[in-house]
């Protein structure tokens, strides 16, 4: 039995929804995702909680108090807690581009407000001891690049308004470091956006699969860290690249996803191509999951930051037949336990 009990280990529910749909595979409902999570077990250890997607068909952003009470009871019945949220800020879910029209940006902030209200209610119910609300810019890098400076100002203004709303509910917002979102698609660009927001409750959401693509300069070649002819067998250069990246972004990081990536991009359903999530046991994975997570969870001197009370596995756009296999989730839980064994602590 592992002695460390922090950070808490969460599974993500949104792989049942993201990348699914009419032009891909059917979504996997929340009940099934909860059961798959709760059933996973490695050496007597289990997941501690789930992070949620606040959109249909999982959790409606317009959930009533009764809906939320039923949700809390359901998650609690699996002996799980609730952590971070994905706010549905995109146009197709009622939001809009963070650098779009006044109406689009207003819709963006409204969706964040609804997510934060849900967050506070679930905190008050005792089912959500920690977590953030995750956002992105809801716009592609190509559109952003047409006026990088002007569009960054617009995104920052929208994020600033969203942060002010979130503060009213005691919530913080984490901007997702993913190469498919304009103003967030390169590591320096991401920092510029965060600095422009200038609010104490804005931070960075690091996903190991997505941030690996920052090193390669996907969608932002001028911010590439690794050489163009990089050989993935050159572990020393990869480690140095990860150190450079995490030194810059770790101070901003308030939410963290453990993940694996094979160095490629992938998209399915309506989701644009982004860092491919691989299974924890994928032989083509370029990361040493447990070791490389330490670049985010420890400071430059190797000391634990203990800043993140929970960490989450993210494996979006896995085929449904893979997601329905218990071994998939046991392998993931096993990888998460190794992260906590190396970089966790006891409270």
Image (cartoon, rainbow, N blue to C red):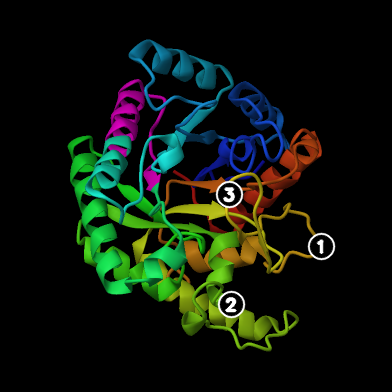
Up-down relation of residue 170 to residue 287 (above or below) = above
| Residue 184, visible in the rendered structure | no
Q: Residues within 10 Å of mark 2 (few under 14, many from 20)?
A: many
> Which of the two marks, 1 or 3, is nearer to us in this view?
3
Q: Secondary structure at mark 1?
A: loop
Query: How far from the left and from the top, in percent, is residue 109?
Result: 27, 42
Of residues 283 and 340, which is closer to you in this image?
Answer: 283
Of residues 7 and 28, which is closer to you in this image?
Answer: 28
CB contact under 8 Å: marks 3 and 2: no
Of residues 100 and 75, which is closer to you in this image?
Answer: 100
Question: What's the distance in space between the residues labelled 3 and 2, CA to CA?
Answer: 20 Å
- Magenta range: 112-134
Q: What residue did someone put label 2 on?
A: 216
Quarter of the C terminus within the rendering: top left
Q: What residue did someone put label 1 on?
A: 283
Q: Secondary structure at mark 2?
A: helix
Nearest to N terminus: mark 3 or mark 2: 2
Q: Residue at x 38, y 33 (%)?
A: 129
Q: Residue at x 77, y 33 (%)?
A: 324
Q: Is residue 317 left or right of residue 216?
A: right
Q: Secondary structure at mark 3?
A: loop
| Residue 156, visible in the rendered structure | yes
Magenta residue check for 113: yes
Nearest to N terminus: mark 1 or mark 3: 3
């Amino acid at each position: 039995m592992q002695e460390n009990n922090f950070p808490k280990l969460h599974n993500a529910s949104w792989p049942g929804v993201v990348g699914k749909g009419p032009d891909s595979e059917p979504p996997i409902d929340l009940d099934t995702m909860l059961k798959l999570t709760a059933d996973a077990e490695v050496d007597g250890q289990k997941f501690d909680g789930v992070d949620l997607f606040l959109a249909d068909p999982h959790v409606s952003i317009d959930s009533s108090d009764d809906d939320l009470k039923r949700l809390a009871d359901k998650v609690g019945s699996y002996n799980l807690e609730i952590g971070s949220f994905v706010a549905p800020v995109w146009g197709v879910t009622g939001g809009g581009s963070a650098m779009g029209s006044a109406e689009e940006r207003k819709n963006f902030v409204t969706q964040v407000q609804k997510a934060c209200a849900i967050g506070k209610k679930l905190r008050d119910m005792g089912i959500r001891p920690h977590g953030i609300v995750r956002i992105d810019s809801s716009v592609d890098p190509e559109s952003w690049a047409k006026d990088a400076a002007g569009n960054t100002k617009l995104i920052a203004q929208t994020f600033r308004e969203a942060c002010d709303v979130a503060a009213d509910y005691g919530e913080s917002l984490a901007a997702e470091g993913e190469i498919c979102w304009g103003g967030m698609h390169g590591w320096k660009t991401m920092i510029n956006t965060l600095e422009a927001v200038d609010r104490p409750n804005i931070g960075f959401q690091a996903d190991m699969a997505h941030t690996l693509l920052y090193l390669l300069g996907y969608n932002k070649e001028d911010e590439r860290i690794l050489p163009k002819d990089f050989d993935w067998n050159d572990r020393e250069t990869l480690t140095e690249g990860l150190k450079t990246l995490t030194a810059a972004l770790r101070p901003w990081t308030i939410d963290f996803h453990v993940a694996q990536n094979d160095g490629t991009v992938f998209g399915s359903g309506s989701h644009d191509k982004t860092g491919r999530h691989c299974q924890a046991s994928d032989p083509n994975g370029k990361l040493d999951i447990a070791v490389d997570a330490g670049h985010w969870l420890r400071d430059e001197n190797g000391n634990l930051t203990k800043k993140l009370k929970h960490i989450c596995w993210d494996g979006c756009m896995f085929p449904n037949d893979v997601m329905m296999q218990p071994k998939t989730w046991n392998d993931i839980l096993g990888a998460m336990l190794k992260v906590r064994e190396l970089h966790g602590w006891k409270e």
